[in-house]
């Protein structure tokens, strides 16, 4: 018999009350931010680059506390990023469709390892980003990469694609713009007013 202070499932359905909110932890995200000294530059050529004498942009959480800062890009930074993408294009476009597909699928494994941290970072920033949705997106576009030569036999990658996004662009929306180009053998440069942590 149910205790008088605890409602039965039937009683909860009748009143449509919600249960207590689940306790959320952001320990993994906080540790990741601390590991990077809560300060980010640009990610180019496989490493973070933090140019000197640049303006910084602070990213705040929902309570107004500063989560981290990121460097604001200048024209020279965008040129360097485009140059880096052009260099990457040479090796990426020379991969077979199967190799590109496998590279995109390796990102699924990375998301599996760091999905909790990604979810916590999104919660801190009050953005919606489901690691499982990103996994499905990566799987979908890796199949594009795998089937490119079968479905479009005369396709030849042309060069670098520049993705311009708004300051309210989500990680999922950015991936929707970037992954088709990667699947087809192109590299990309993202130009955005938004500070991406990921």
Image (tube, rainbow, N blue to C red):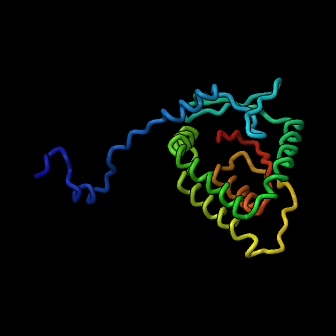
Q: Position of residue 122 (x, y in %)?
A: 56, 43
47 sits left or right of 13 in the view = right
Relative to residue 193, is residue 153 depicted above or below?
below
Residue at the outermost left position? 1
Q: Nearer the viewer, residue 55 or 158?
A: 158
Above or below: residue 65 compared with residue 122: above
Q: Is residue 175 above or below residue 82?
A: below
Instruction: Looking at the picture, tell me which residue is in the foreground, 132 or 154.
Output: 154
Image spot of residue 39 (x, y percent): 68, 28
- Where is residue 65? Give x, y as percent: 58, 28
Q: Residue at x 75, y 62 (%)?
A: 96
Q: Residue at the location (56% across, 43% down)?
A: 118
Residue at the image point whose x is 85% and y is 47% from the top: 87
Looking at the rendered image, the quarter that the C terminus falls into is top right
**Closer to us: 103 or 21:** 103
Q: How many marks?
A: 0
> Which residue appears at 48% of the width and 32% of the height?
27
The x, y position of residue 21, in whole percent, is 37, 43
Q: Quadrant of residue 25?
A: top left
User: Foreground residue, 171 or 132?
Assistant: 132
Using residue 70 as the reference point, say whether residue 191 is left or right of it: right
């Amino acid at each position: 018999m149910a205790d008088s202070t605890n409602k039965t499932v039937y009683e909860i359905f009748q009143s449509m009350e919600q249960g207590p909110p689940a306790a959320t932890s952001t320990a993994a995200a906080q540790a990741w931010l601390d590991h990077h000294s809560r300060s980010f530059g640009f990610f180019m050529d496989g490493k973070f680059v933090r140019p000197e004498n640049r303006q910084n942009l602070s990213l705040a959480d929902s309570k107004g506390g500063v989560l981290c800062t990121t460097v604001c890009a200048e024209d020279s930074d965008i040129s360097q990023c485009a140059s880096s993408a052009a260099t990457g294009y040479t090796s990426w476009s020379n991969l077979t469709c199967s190799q590109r597909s496998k590279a995109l699928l390796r990102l699924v494994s990375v998301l599996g390892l760091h999905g909790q941290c990604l979810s916590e970072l999104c919660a801190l920033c009050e953005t919606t980003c489901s690691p499982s949705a990103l996994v499905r997106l990566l799987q979908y576009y890796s199949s594009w990469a795998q089937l490119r030569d079968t479905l479009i036999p005369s396709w030849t990658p042309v060069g670098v694609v520049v993705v311009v996004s708004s300051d309210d662009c989500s990680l999922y929306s950015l991936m929707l713009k970037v992954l088709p180009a990667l699947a087809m053998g192109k590299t990309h440069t993202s130009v955005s007013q938004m500070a991406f942590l990921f």
